[in-house]
Image (spheres, rainbow, N blue to C red):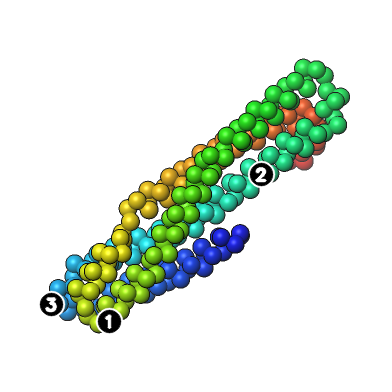
Amino acid sequence: MTTPERLLAIAGVTVVASAALLVAYLRQSNPADAQARGCDAQRAQLSQTLDQVRFSTSAAHAASTALHDTAAIRTKYADMIVALRRSRDVAHLSASTSERVRNDLAQASWILDSQDEPLHHAAALLGEDERQLTTAMPLIAEASADIREDDCPALSLTVSRSGWPKDRLILELSEASRLSADVNDKLETVLGLILDAQNAVHPETVATQQSGR
């Protein structure tokens, strides 16, 4: 796990735990008292907000981990392409086989290079989403204080000023996950091309692998 992922995981645990405690308090408090004070609408809005905070935090961490794994696989495949191109066995191939290997590796390399933009876009979306999630901690702290003081107007103001719930955040998390999944699909194609080239360059290795299954 990289440093950014560790930070997100630690912050995520803190946010989720704090939100869970506040949700539990809201559910255990007396509904009749809340209605008498006119806090039912504010508490309902806060409960919805906290549910989104917890979901978004967990989703952001999962998306960040998946994106990191996708980028690592992409790097691994790029290294495999370089190794095959440098293999001395390529010089001993027939002209037609050598040409096919070069074409497969060139296509695989082109597909890998074309994934830079979607990977960077997904990373940018997640970076902004993670920044937005950090705003949840002040919200939770202020809302907790408002509830303890039975200050319904302050609670309403706290929630409205926070900008939560953030529907755009959910859309951005979905888009980042979609981009990562699309890149993974492309990587499957790349792997097929690499294995075809590897089979041509090192057929004995592939045969050994198949006999050992």
Q: Disc 1 marks which residue? A: 148
Crowding around mark 3 (Cα neighbors within 10 Å: few <14, some 14 to 19, many 20+) is few
Rendered location of residue 132, percent (x, y): 40, 59
Up/down of 144 relative to 48, above or below: below
> Dot 2 corresponds to which residue?
75
Residue 169 position (above or below residue 27): above
Say what amino acid the circle numbered 1 marks: Arg
Q: Quadrant of residue 209?
A: top right
* Residue at the limit of the structure toward the left, as seen here: 36
Residue at the farthest bottom position: 149
**Label 2 sits on what residue type?**
Thr
Image quadrant containing the N terminus: bottom right
Q: Secondary structure at mark 2?
A: helix
Q: Residue furthest top?
A: 96
Q: Few, some or many C-alpha atoms within 10 Å of disc 2 (few <14, some 14-19, many ≥20)?
A: few
Q: CA distance from mark 3 to mark 2?
A: 60 Å
Residue drawn where x is 58% and y is 46% of the image: 70
Q: Nearer the viewer, residue 179 or 33?
A: 179
Circles 2 and 1 in contact, beta carbons < 8 Å: no
Tag in front: 1 or 3 = 1
**146 on left or right of 102:** left
**Residue at position x 69%, y 39% in the image:** 78
Horizontal side of residue 80 vs 185, given as left or right = right
Q: Amino acid at mark 3?
A: Ala
Reading the image, the residue beneath label 3 is 36
Disc 2 from disc 1: Cα separation:
52 Å
Image location of residue 59, percent across then percent down: 44, 56
Q: Quarter-wise, where is residue 194 in the image?
A: top right
Q: Name which of mark 3 and mark 2 comes first in the sequence.
A: 3
Label 1 vs 3, first from the N-terminus: 3
User: Tag 1 or tag 2, which sits nearer the N-term?
Assistant: 2
